[in-house]
Amino acid sequence: MTAQHRTLSVPRTAHLHQLGTLSSATQHVWVVCHGYGQLAKYFIRHFKGLEDEQTVLLAPEALSRFYLEGFSGRVGATWMTKEERLLEIDDYVEYLNLVWQLIQKEAPNARLTLLGFSQGAVTVCRWLAFSAVPCEKLILWAGAFPEDIEYTGLSTTLAHTSVYMVYGLQDPFITKERLHNQLEILRSQGIQPILIPFEGKHELNKDILAQLKANTI
């Protein structure tokens, strides 16, 4: 007899790390999603100093953790793997929807900026494609739109969104060919991203983060 595959939806604890205080005075909320193998409590340190009386940053942590090497030591998190990937996508979309509900409740006047780093870039793109969250800025850092994304509704969602693609010129994961192919697809969908290259590898850059916050790019 072939074994049956069944699923159960279970409650679990998700983790958010926050810089600043959400309130009715908050005008800008950044939701920043980390890359593969990172943890939110360390990732959010890169954004220290961007918070102020009107700006709050939230770093949700991916739901699946694992040891980076062997059976002990440093721990990282991942948004999804190839195993039951569609269910994992459903789970993190629902999770990020709850983050958005929290923002709407505690900072009802805030405008949203989404930043995804590496695997986090794919994550925020899928979230937007499935949930149509109103977003003032979408910053894809060292990452891109996933190849299998559905643009039908996403193009409408991003019609009034500033889309940025930030990448290090020495990033081994961002090749000229991949960047060219991505841009061709996006432009065919009416999405015109602003490209921001910098001298660096697969990493964040404080100066560019500050410029993005100040709208000087």
Image: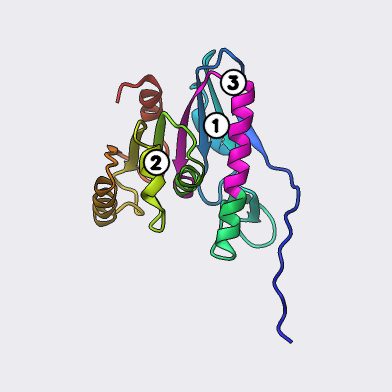
Residue at x 34%, y 35% (from the top left corner): 159
**Can you say which quadrant of the picture contains the C terminus?**
top left
User: What secondary structure is found at the residue carrying circle 3?
Assistant: loop
**Residue denoted by label 1:** 45
Q: CA distance from mark 3 to mark 1?
A: 22 Å
- Dot in front, 2 or 1: 2
Say if mark 3 contacts mark 1, CB within 8 Å. no
- Picture coordinates of residue 44, whole percent (x, y): 55, 33
Mark 2 belongs to which amino acid?
Answer: Leu
Q: Earlier in the sequence, mark 3 or mark 1?
A: 1
Q: Earlier in the sequence, mark 2 or mark 1?
A: 1
Q: Is residue 126 left or right of residue 11?
A: left
Q: CA distance from mark 2 to mark 1?
A: 18 Å
Q: Which residues are magenta?
A: 92-121
Say if mark 2 contacts mark 3, CB within 8 Å. no
Circle 1 packing at 10 Å, graded few (<14), some (14-19), many (20+), is few
The quadrant holding residue 154 is top left
